[in-house]
Amino acid sequence: MHAQSTGAPAASPAEPDPGADTRAGHDLVDLAHHGDAEVGEGLVDLAVNVRRAPMPSWLAEPITASLANLAAYPDPRPARAAVAARHGRPPAEVLLTAGAAEGFVLLAQALRGACRPVVVHPQFTEPEAALRAAGHTVERVLLDPADGFRLHPDRIPADADLVMIGNPTNPTSVLHPAADLAALARPGRVLVVDEAFADTTCAPGVPGEPESLAARRDLPGLLVVRSLTKTWGLAGLRIGYLLGEAALLERLAAVQPLWAVGTPALAAATACAGPEAVRAERAIAARLAADRDHLVARLSALPGVRVAGRPASAFVLIHRPGADRVRAELRRRGWAVRRGDTFPGLGPDWLRIAVRDRATTDAFIAVLTETLGV
Ligand SMILES: Cc1ncc(COP(=O)(O)O)c(C=O)c1O
C-alpha cells in the first residue's frame, strides 16, 4: 500500500471509450468510465452490478401509487423517518440523495475547506472525480493486491481531514473489518464510508450486515453512504442516502438542489426501509453468497486466473496477464465484463465480473475457458 498524489493527470484507458464522460477534461476520462459503458445490444452483461429481478409488489405498488401525486412537490419527511428508523438513528442523521452518486458531489462541494483529502483505492471512481471536479487536490492511498487489498489503518496520513473508502469495496469485493474503519475516525476528520453494496454482504451467524457502520453514532465525523439502486434494480430511479452527524448533514443539505429526490424515489426509499425489505435483502445476500462461491470456484480452477482477496459482494475481481485482450475477445463472443484499467491501483491485467446465477456463470466459464485457450 502506498500513497500517490494526483495533482498530475491520471493515465488514460488503454482504448478510447466513446461513452466516457469527459465533463472535466482529459484527466477525468478514466475516472468517469463505468460498467454501463461496457454493455450493449446482444451482450450478456457481467459488467454492471445492478441486480436484475422482477420488482417485488411491496416495492412496485408504492412506486406506482406515487405517480398519482406527481403534481405536488416531493416531501422527503416520511422517507427520511423510515430510513432513520431502519438504521436506529434520528431523522436529522439522514439525508436522502439522488443515488449515492449525488452524495459524493454534495460532500465534495460542502467540504471545500478540506486540506488533505485522501481516497483509498482501488475503489469506485466517482468520489475522487467529485472531489477533483470541486477543485480538491486528491491524495490516493493504494491498497496492495499482494496483500489481498487489505486496509492498514496506519497508512492513512494522520492529518488527512477527509478520508474516503468503500466497504465492501468496488471493484475488489473486499470487506474491511468494521474495527479497522472505526480506527480511522477522529475529531477534525470526515470519514466517508461508501456502503453502496453493504446490503449484498452476509456472514454465517451474523443477523445483519457484517462490518457495516450504518448504525454507529459514536464515531466522530463518520458519514456512511448508502445506495438503493443495486439490490433493488433502481439505477434509473436514483435513490440513496447519507447517514451521519446532523450538523455535518446540514452542511451537505445546504448545497443540495431543492427537491433533488423525486416522489417515486422517496416512495422506494420508504418501502426499502421496511422490515419486509430488510428480510428480503438478507435472503438475497445469502443466495448471492452461494452463487459467488460457485463463480469463485470455477474461476479459481482456470490456469493463470487469480481471484483477488476474499470476495464479499456482488462481483469478483480477477487478475490474469493480458486480461484486456481476454475482455475484447469475450466481447466478440457476446459477453461484457468490466475492464480493470480505469481503476487507480489496477491495470490492464484485471477484470471485474458480476456474480450471476449458476447457469449464467457456467455458460460464461465455458466461453472464458475457450477464450483463454485452455
Ligand atoms: C461503490 C459504489 N458506490 C456508489 C455508487 C453509486 O450508486 P448510485 O446508483 O446509488 O448512485 C456505485 C455505482 O456503481 C458504486 O459502485
Image (spheres, grey):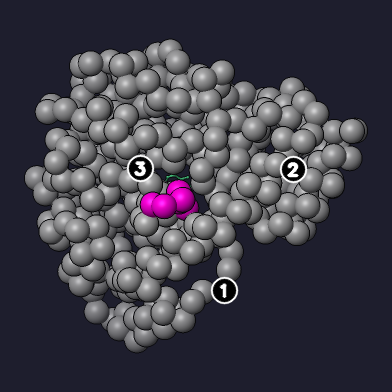
Amino acid under disc 3: Glu
Q: Position of residue 72 (x, y in %)?
A: 24, 79
Instruction: Find the distance from the CA under tag 1 to the CA under tag 3.
Output: 29 Å
For mark 1, give the secondary structure: loop
Q: Is residue 339 above or below residue 53?
A: above
Pointer 1: what residue?
Answer: 54
For mark 3, give the secondary structure: loop
Residue drawn at (46%, 33%), measured in percent from left and top?
A: 123
User: Is 204 a magenta residue?
Assistant: yes
- Confirm or reject: label 1 Cβ below 8 Å from ligand 1: no
**Farthest front residue in view:** 205
Amino acid under disc 2: Arg
Instruction: Identify the mark nearer the N-term, 2 or 3.
Output: 3
Residue drawn at (17%, 37%), measured in percent from left and top?
A: 219
Q: Name the disc covering residue 298, or none.
A: 2
Q: Quadrant of residue 42?
A: bottom right
Q: Is residue 30 visible?
A: no
Q: Name the disc covering residue 211, or none.
A: 3
**Picture quarter with the N terminus:** top left
Q: Which residues are magenta?
A: 200-206
Amino acid under disc 1: Pro
Instruction: Answer with left or right where residue 210 lies relative to residue 285.
Output: left
Magenta-drawn stretch, dominant element (helix, strand or loop): loop
Q: Quadrant of residue 133?
A: top left
Q: Quadrant of residue 16?
A: top right
